[in-house]
Every structure is written in C-alpha cells, then in structure tokens.
Amino acid sequence: MTVRTRKVSINEPDQPDNQTNQINPSTLFAIVLAGGSGTRFWPLSRETCPKQMLRIVGEDTLLRQTIKRIKGFVPSRNIWVVTTEDKVQDTRFHLVPLGPVAKEIQFISEPVGRNTAPAIGLAATCLHRRSPDSVMIVMPSDHAIPDEKEFLRDLNLAIEGALEGNLITFGIRPTRPETGYGYIRIDQPDKPDEPDKLYAVDRFLEKPDLETAKSFLSEGGYFWNSGIFVWKTSKILSEFQKHLPSLYSTLKEIACLLSSSEERISVSSHRHIDSLTQRCNGRYGRILPGEQDRRSQPDKPDQPDQPDTRINDLYSTIDPVSIDYGIMERSKDVRMIPATFQWSDLGSWAALDEIIERDQAGNILRGNTIDIGSRNSIIFSDKRLIATIGLEDMVVVDTPDATLVTPKGRTQEVRKIVDVLKQNNREEHLIHLTVARPWGSYTVLEKGEGYKIKRIVLNPGARLSLQRHSRRSEHWVVVSGVARVTREGEVDLVHINESTFIPINSKHRLENPGEKPLQIIEVQNGDYVEEDDIERFADDYGRP
Amino acid sequence: MTVRTRKVSINEPDQPDNQTNQINPSTLFAIVLAGGSGTRFWPLSRETCPKQMLRIVGEDTLLRQTIKRIKGFVPSRNIWVVTTEDKVQDTRFHLVPLGPVAKEIQFISEPVGRNTAPAIGLAATCLHRRSPDSVMIVMPSDHAIPDEKEFLRDLNLAIEGALEGNLITFGIRPTRPETGYGYIRIDQPDKPDEPDKLYAVDRFLEKPDLETAKSFLSEGGYFWNSGIFVWKTSKILSEFQKHLPSLYSTLKEIACLLSSSEERISVSSHRHIDSLTQRCNGRYGRILPGEQDRRSQPDKPDQPDQPDTRINDLYSTIDPVSIDYGIMERSKDVRMIPATFQWSDLGSWAALDEIIERDQAGNILRGNTIDIGSRNSIIFSDKRLIATIGLEDMVVVDTPDATLVTPKGRTQEVRKIVDVLKQNNREEHLIHLTVARPWGSYTVLEKGEGYKIKRIVLNPGARLSLQRHSRRSEHWVVVSGVARVTREGEVDLVHINESTFIPINSKHRLENPGEKPLQIIEVQNGDYVEEDDIERFADDYGRP
C-alpha cells in the first residue's frame, strides 16, 4: 500500500502554487462520459433527453454541473465529451447555456455504445495521438457531487498518484448496505479512514445482495465504486494492451484510419444528424468541435466515406465491456483514494433519497403536488396536479405524456416499462412533448388525425432554419412577442393576435427580431405531420 | 312481519297481465335523485361532472343507466329528476343522448342541496298536487345495478307493498363486513333468505366499524341499506308530517307559492343558468320540462321574482337530513325486501372491486396503462400513459389535468383533496379540460398569459350560440369537416386547412353544416380569456 501526503496541484486558487510534481495544465484532460441512455429515470429521461440532461439534483442539469465542476480545473478545450453519434448534436445544443466554455468543449462520438471500456479506450487513443504525456480524468456525466471543493481537492491527490503510474479510482465510504453499487475492497482494511492516502486495492466486487452488503459494512474496508478515474493516457493504453488485447488492436486500427487532419475538421452541416429521426453514417471516432458559430465557418467538402464505414464496422464488432471488469479488476497498479466528497450515482429514482433533502415526513415533493399523509415517498410533478394520499415508500413521477407509479423497492424495473414501449413502437420513451432546441423550444399540445398543434418559443434574436415541408401547411398565431416571417422570399412582421399561413411546399423561416421571447401557436395540417418532413436550406445550428 | 307472495305488476313483458292490485301506470312515478356532487370519485368526478355523469361501470353513465333501467317500467313523463339548481342545465344536456325519452323527463330543482329528506319531500309535495294517488319509486342516480330484470321483478313486489300503505326499502344481502354502508336489521332474522317477502324492520344502523360489521355478518339478519324506496306519495307526506313536522310545514308553504300553472311553465331562455360560472336566482322547486326543441317554443315573460325569492329563503332555512335518519328509522310502517339484484352504491374508488370484473391478478386496468406485476389495484387512465410497477391494493386515476394516487384503504379521503383545491381557489375540482356540450364538446389544450387554445368538436347540424366577446379575439383553424361561420352578418364556409379570424366585439356564430363532425382549433387572444366573457344573442339550447 502506498501512503502519500498531498504534494501536487494545479489551478487550485486556495493553495499557493509551490507544490512539487506540478503537471503542465495543457496535458490534463477531462473525459466526460455522456453516452448513457438513462432509462432508469424514465419518464423524466427519454432517449433524446437522457439522465445527464435532467435537472433532478441541484440547480442545473447533471451534465452541465459536471462541466461546471471541472471547467476551472482543466482548460476548457481539454474537456472532451464522449457520447454516441446519435446524441452528439443534442449534447452540443445542451451545453450552449454554459456560455463561451461550450464552444471550447470537444466531442468524441462512438458509432454505438459499447459500455465504458471501449468509450474510454477510444478517448485514450485519440488523446494519445494529440498529447502523449496527457493525464485523463474520466468522469461520468450523470452523477451528483454537491461538494465541488472537496472533489477538486481529492482530484489533486489523484493526479499526483496518476503521474506516478497508478490507475487511480475514488472509493466512497458506504453509509448503508446498498445493493445498487459495485464495491471496492482495499488491501489494508484496518485503516481505511485516513484521507489523502492511496490504498492498494484487493478486489472489485459486483453489486452484492443485501446480506453480503451488510457483511461488507460490518467487516469494514469496503468502498463504493464511484466510476471516477485518473490515469496517464499512456498507462491506460498499456493496460488495454495487456488486459483487453483484442479491443486494443481494434482501437489501434481505428487510430490509423483517423488522419490527424480529421481530428480538427469541422463537420459539414449536412452531415449532422437530426437525432431521433435520423442516424448519420460515419463522423465518429473523431474529435468534433464544440458549439461554434457555424455561420462564420465555410463548409468543407466531405471526406470519402470509406474510412468512416470501416471505422463503423470495426466499432460494431467490439464486445461491450466495462472498464471495471476489463481493466480495473485485472490491473496490479490500481490505487484507491477514499473520497471526501458527497456522491451519488443516481442509479434510480430511489437514489434521490441519498442526495436530496427530505421533508419532515421523509418525502421529496416537487412541482404541482397536493399530499395528505404520505411518508418517505418521492413525488415529482411537472405542471399537472398530482394528488397523493397515504403513500409509503412510493415513487410517483409525472410528465405531460406519461406517469410512473412504483414502490421505491422496484424502481430498477423501470427499464422493463421502457422495453415494453420499445416493443410496441410507442414514443413515450423516445421524446418529450416539450423539446429543447438551441433557438428555444417547442411543445406538442395535441396530435390528431391530419393535424398537430405546437406552441413554439423562440429566444430573442434567434431564428429557425430556412425550411420547407412537402406534406403539411402551417397556421401561425402569435400570442406574445413579434415574429419576422419569411415566406417565398417575402418578409413580414406578425404581431400579437395576428396570424399567418405557410402553404405546403413554400420556403419559409421564423425569426424573433425582438428583445423578449416570441411565442406562437402552430397548427399543422396535412396527411403527414412528423418532424422529418423538413428540408433545410440554411440553418444557424449546422443541421442538415 | 308480513310475508307476501307476488301479486301485482305493471309493464312486465314476461308476465301475463293477470295480476290483482294492478296500479294505474299514470300514477306510478320514478324520482331520480341526481343532486350528488360525487367528490369521492375525484379526479374523474368534478363539480360540473358529478359521479352520476360518469361512465365508470357499464356502457353508459350511471344516470343514463338509471333512466334506461326504469324507462320501460314507468311512463317516460313520470320520470322526475331531482337535482340542484346549478346542475339542472348540465343534467338536461347530459340526458340528450337518451333520445326521445329525454324530452319527456321532468326536472325538480332544489335551490341548494339539503340531503335526501328535503329533496324527496319537495318531490312528494309537487307530485301530490299533480297526482294525489301516485306511488313514488325513489332511486339514487349513481348506483350500479347490473341486473335490470331482477331489479324490476323486485320493484313489482315493492309497489304492491307500497299500495298497502308501507314504506318499502330494499335490503342487500351483505357479502363482506363492509364499513362503508348503513345496515338494516330485520325483525325476524332467523329466516332472512326467503325472496318475495316483506320483512318488518327492527332498526336502521349507521356505518359500523369493522368489528361491528363482522358481528353483523356472523349474527345474520342484517342487510345493507340500498337507499331505494317505494311508497305512496300520500303516505310519505303523512310520515313527514309526523316525524319531520318543521320540514313538512316548510314544504307546505313552498307548495302554496308554486302556482300549478308554473309547474308546466317553460323556463324562458335567458333565465337559464350557465353552470359553474353563474348561479340563477329562483326557478327551483318547480317542474321544468326536459330537453325540448326550444327554437319552436315562444319565450314566455318572466314571473315576478317575489315567490322565487321566498322559496329560496325558505329552502335555505331547511336543516339537512337524510331520509333514513329523518323518516325510515322512526316510522313503524317500514318494510324491507331482500333484493335479488346485484348492487353497489359506488361510494368510493375502492367500491369498483364489488362490481367490475377483475383480471387474474385482481386488477382493474382501464385506458392507456402498462403494468408490471401489480395486484388488486385499480388503474384508470384516459389518453396519457400510466405505467405502474408492483402496486398492491392501490388506486391510480388519471385525467388530463390531475392524477390521484392512493391506497384503496384511504380512498374515502379524496374529499380532503377536493377541500384543499377549494381552499386554494383552484379549478381541478370544478371542471374537466374536456367539457361536454349539447352541440358537441370543447377541450382546453393550453391556457397561458393572454391566450387560451381549445379544440372544438361540433356535431353534424349543430351550432353554437350567436355570440360576442368583449375581451378576446379568436382565430379558428379547421382541421376536419366544414365550418359555416357567421361574422357581423356575413356568412362564409371555412374548409379544412383554412382559417378565419373573429375580432373582439364582433357578433359571430359557428355551425357545422356537414354530415361529419367539425373540428376546429381555436386560439383565443386577449387580456381575459374565461368562459364568462360571452354575450349570447340567440341559442338553440336556451342559455342566457
């Protein structure tokens, strides 16, 4: 076991900058894993709005909190978000509210999700070509860590350990016999409570049953596996080579297909995916720029498709494997730091109890609720009223198109509901009725035979793409703000209580020239009123 | 105790018409009590859509089922519906789908609800002046009785008993120690199971606790009190005189204020209430005609208000009292018939178990639900998805603007939720987002600052009133069917995918001249977008 007092630090404003082993900030990278679909938080999470994009704990979404937590610590352009191809655009849009940092963040997109080891391996492969001396901080995007300062303090210690060639992981001191987490057993369990130490790890353990979890607690020396890691890129790649040689050679082959020029290439707009309805071929395994002002960037001609297709094929052959199972359990150089920060992986609705303050009756009530005498229950409402009487240890989550009711003990089974929805080709697991867009949002108020009604909110100064629909016309009624409407080249202002009509097949654009949000009610008429009946001629957000 | 075999009958097609004691059909009346607010079925029941108007058991609403059950047995114009003033119009509209019979049904409206004794006393007072030899069948409008034939069979026996001067009530053989019902103990409990008998009653008992209810069951001779009664009008009035003398004299005074000419008067259209938003003065305590074609009826001038005001004042002074407590417990002439029909008073959501078939897991699932492993639960959904996992003995009821979640054992407390809504001046206990109208229905899709969006469905041939709004304009987009729109005297046809605009203060009318339903999306704009901003100039349904 290695015992070490803290020596290195970067960018920690509280500390004088006089430590040894100082790392060059340009070689420190944060790899944010944001590929999770988060079905366990259904109905609040959807395929197009996974858990990391939810505002369930704290003031902002989990992903944006993750970026905020790290952004002063790591140079903004060294923050890399790894997600799957179908989530890249939505994830980019999602980060826009972070301001300038959003434009610096880089994206790595996997063709498909293959669990954490391939995602981390792909990031390490890209990173190693860019910066062979780099240190990677690997962090999930959907965990709750309320204590930013404590987290950064522990991170400094981890970086020091990583620079010495260790694979560093954070262990969380267990407070209850939790069956939803994996555990880490340290090598010297008799002194597990000294902070600022690196502990050698005896073994990693899968999620235990309740009896086993209880014995872990009474025995001592067991920690929850947080899934947050720090290591040198070169070190993790050599561990891949040793313990996952097949995956390693696939990643090497992918690396050869990625020309270094491609890594900085701007993705031409028509190659971008429109999530949910379209899947893009190619454009993965490379670093994509963050949300930049695409109007100022000239489109570059596409590269031929062959390398993309080959990468796609290669990636699909990869067996899904977690980094814990594939590397951490097998490597001899793993060291654990007992975290001093509060943490929850928010693995299910029931996990909110760990991290959100409960009222006197043990309830967490949010939104439009009326409760009579419930205890230890979690009740999430949006706008509609949820009235509850005498619930005990229950979870009730309401959204405009779906409501979940389940005892806390069975929240893990929410996945099964999502499976049923998939099997039945329904939409309640895919998309919310209100969809955030970089220009604002839209809400589907009703959809019926031959029509769809939306409320569209357009931010000041924003505009939708110049577009055309081949199977529907649109009536727009302005209910607040002023709209600038382009229709077949003619431009009109439409004020509150005025309306306009967009016939089928006419090229049109909606803009908000004002200083307050524009709200319009759109009534679509046609034999087909789905989102993919759209032809874009110009778009501020790089959509095809 | 009187034991009697069956002798009399009217209108029973299965039986040859050769019984003795035949009643003259013109003197047989069905008094349907329809004043209940039914808060216990919230959120499906609302102040403007009480329990009797719900389709919770069987193919039609409880009130319409009640009318259908009795309409071949009693002449249609001898069916009198007693309800409160604020529910008369909605109740009339509600009966329209019954067809011609709806036009025959008479209404008695109470100024305010005062429990069952005053309502029955008022009906008896009116009825006695019309038909002194009449026999009254008194029946709640919100009970479930699946066995129509058995019910009518028992009713024949009851009429015979009534003609002999008894107050007849139906007792239901208890099948479980129910604490939600009142009980009747018969005088000769050793032979309680002979059908076609009239049993003298020992006593009426209030809702018992569980232990007492269990002892009733083991002891025998106890029946549930169904609240269905049969008696001669003259007999019940003499019992009122004896046991509720103060109420009796108030009713006598009211009777003097009701001129017999008024009893058949058509209520002039501008005196009609528009429920929820307006309360009409007067026009109660009299018989109102059913839903007739008001276009063919000339308006009659109003009577002076004095008698109405006096009746109003008198009625408000009446103490609420139930017929059970006020008369049945005190009269010596009560006889009970053990009912042979299945029955439930549907006193709460949990009562559905008694009357609706459950699936193998003991669940009652209705509407858009996905369930994993729940048992003995009642899950009612409308359009939105309700997903449930592992519920036990729970009730989940969803409506577009409110959802209830409660264990079955606490469904009686739904009233408390309604109380909270009232205290907070909310709307979820008053009205549904979809409101049935005699011309069709409207659904509020969204209401926001300065706007409201509705989907309006207009039946073929129907039209709204000629009307004007002083604080809002309206945009109409036709999404199916054809609209005939009158605006300031000009008439236009508006087809699917066309729209029109109704400016503030313009007199307008919407009609459906076609043969299929017309659907329009209405976007209201204005500083005030409530239902009561309406001035009607002509209306097919007699509204002011």
Image: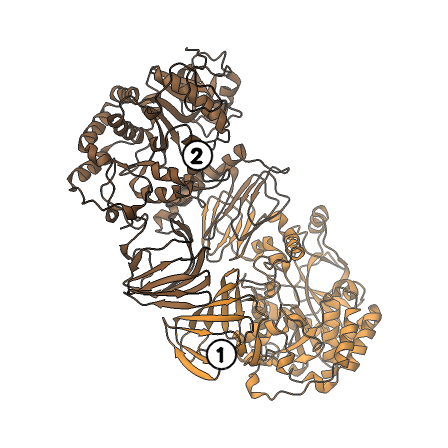
Chain colours: A brown, B orange
Q: Which mark is residue A68?
A: 2
| Crowd around label 2: few <14 · some 14–19 · many ≥20 (10 Å) | some
- What's the amino acid at mark 2? Lys
Q: Quadrant of the C terminus of chain B?
A: bottom right
**The residue marked by circle 2 belongs to what chain?**
A
- Tell me the residue at 26%/30% (across/down): A126
- Tell me the residue at 51%/25% (across/down): A177
Residue B281 appears in which quarter of the rendering? bottom right
Q: Position of residue B235 (x, y in %)?
A: 77, 75
Q: Which mark is residue A106?
A: none
Q: What residue does disc 1 label?
A: B509
Q: Position of residue B54 (x, y in %)?
A: 56, 64
- Asked if residue A187 is positioned above or below residue B257 in the image, the reply reads above
C-alpha gap between disc 2 and disc 1: 57 Å
Q: Position of residue B363 (x, y in %)?
A: 51, 50
- Asked if residue A335 is positioned above or below residue A528 in the image, the reply reads above
- Tell me the residue at 24%/21% (across/down): A241
- What's the amino acid at mark 1? Arg
Foreground residue among B544 and A540: A540
- On screen, residue A163 versus residue A251, left or right, reads right
Residue A42 appears in which quarter of the rendering? top left
For label 1, the SS is strand
